[in-house]
Image (spheres, helix red, strand yellow):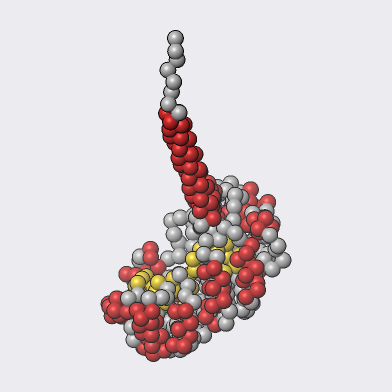
Amino acid sequence: MTRPRLSPAGPAETNGSDDSDNRRNRTSKMTSITRLFHLTHNIFTRYPLLEVARTALHEPRLAWAYRRRSLRVPSLPARMMIDPINLCNLECPLCPTGRHITGMTRSRMPYDLFEHIVNLNPRLRILDLFNLGEPFLNNDIFRMLSLCRKKKIRTAVHTNLAAYDTDWVERIIETPPTRLHISVDGASRDSYVLYRVKGDFDRVRRNMDYLSRRIRETGKGPVVEWAFLYHKGNRQDIPAARSLAEKLGFKFFVRPLVVPKHLGPEWHDPETLASEAVSFRANVVCPHLWLQMTVKPTGALTTCCFAYHDQDESASLAGISCPEQLLELWNSSYYRRGRACFRTESTYREIPKPMLCETCNIYPRHGGLDPQEHPYDSTIRDWM
């Protein structure tokens, strides 16, 4: 029986088709692998997914520690307050800087120290660059803002906008904070200076007009907030101030001036004093001890923005060399004693060094000392 002969062209055509299909499949697989590689590469370089995940996990861990009132926290805070300067051009009567409180070292933070502190906290995402002074009196403020911008740290600066003229405002446009909070308590010269003592209302208005115009012209600049603290001497200016803020394109916030009890009648009428809004006391546990680290211009750690006396300081960050050492300070006996003020047990008394937290009347706490037992002077107790 004769075997049928196959045409030589048949197998050649079949083999060629199979090889072509195989090559296409291999090319398709390689293309898929290449795409997957590039996608993975982009995720971990251009879009650092792991860093996003760590950041997302970071805050809940701190929030859980805050909710449980843990004496120790698991990681560094994503938010810090760094005071660049505790000097001011104004003399606001309820501000410790304006009142020239004794026992408080006046200083400007040098840029090198600021950079060192920022680099110590790799988890830093939000920075309040202000506290007890006028931030723009520190000539390094724009270098500080530029560094934060490079590190993708959101910044907030509180200013009275009365220290310089429009040439300085132009620098704010070029190197802006994320949020600029302007404190202007009045829509007229007479009402403004009742609290902003030594303030130049006309200069502030020129700077506000210039800032608004340049933001519109350039499309650059910060989000601007006008903060209006009202008292019985300027309350009538609120509608005019609100209207002006809308015209300028600024957000407008109004709230009563918070005053110590013994000065209440001097600044507010009886109806306002009857409101909870004028009291420091809030129905929450103090968040500063768990969620925000506060640093003075000298580089010293404190519990919060109200701890302005030198004797309220913890340790200086100037000698700290790594995040691990900063975390140790964040969980030191200084902070543990402050956090323990908000726990029902009294074991915190075994931790040395009395603290301002133990007589603080801003947040409710458990087991704290009576203000009269506090070792500090009467100017502190006046605020209780």
Asked whether, in this view, residue 318 is left or right of residue 77, the answer is right
- Figure disc tally: 0
Residue at left offset 42%, top offset 75% = 221
For residue 366, above or below residue 18: below
Residue at left offset 52%, top offset 80% = 136
Q: Is residue 178 in view from this perspective? A: yes
User: Residue 120, image x and y in percent?
Assistant: 64, 62
Asked whether, in this view, residue 169 is left or right of residue 300, the answer is left
Quadrant assignment, res 274? bottom left
Residue at left offset 72%, top offset 66% = 319
User: Residue 348, image x and y in percent?
Assistant: 63, 51
Asked whether, in this view, residue 266 is left or right of residue 241, the answer is right
Q: Nearer the viewer, residue 166 or 161?
A: 166
Q: Nearer the viewer, residue 272 or 213?
A: 213
User: Residue 350, image x and y in percent?
Assistant: 68, 51
Residue at left offset 49%, top offset 68% = 155
Q: Residue furthest front?
A: 2
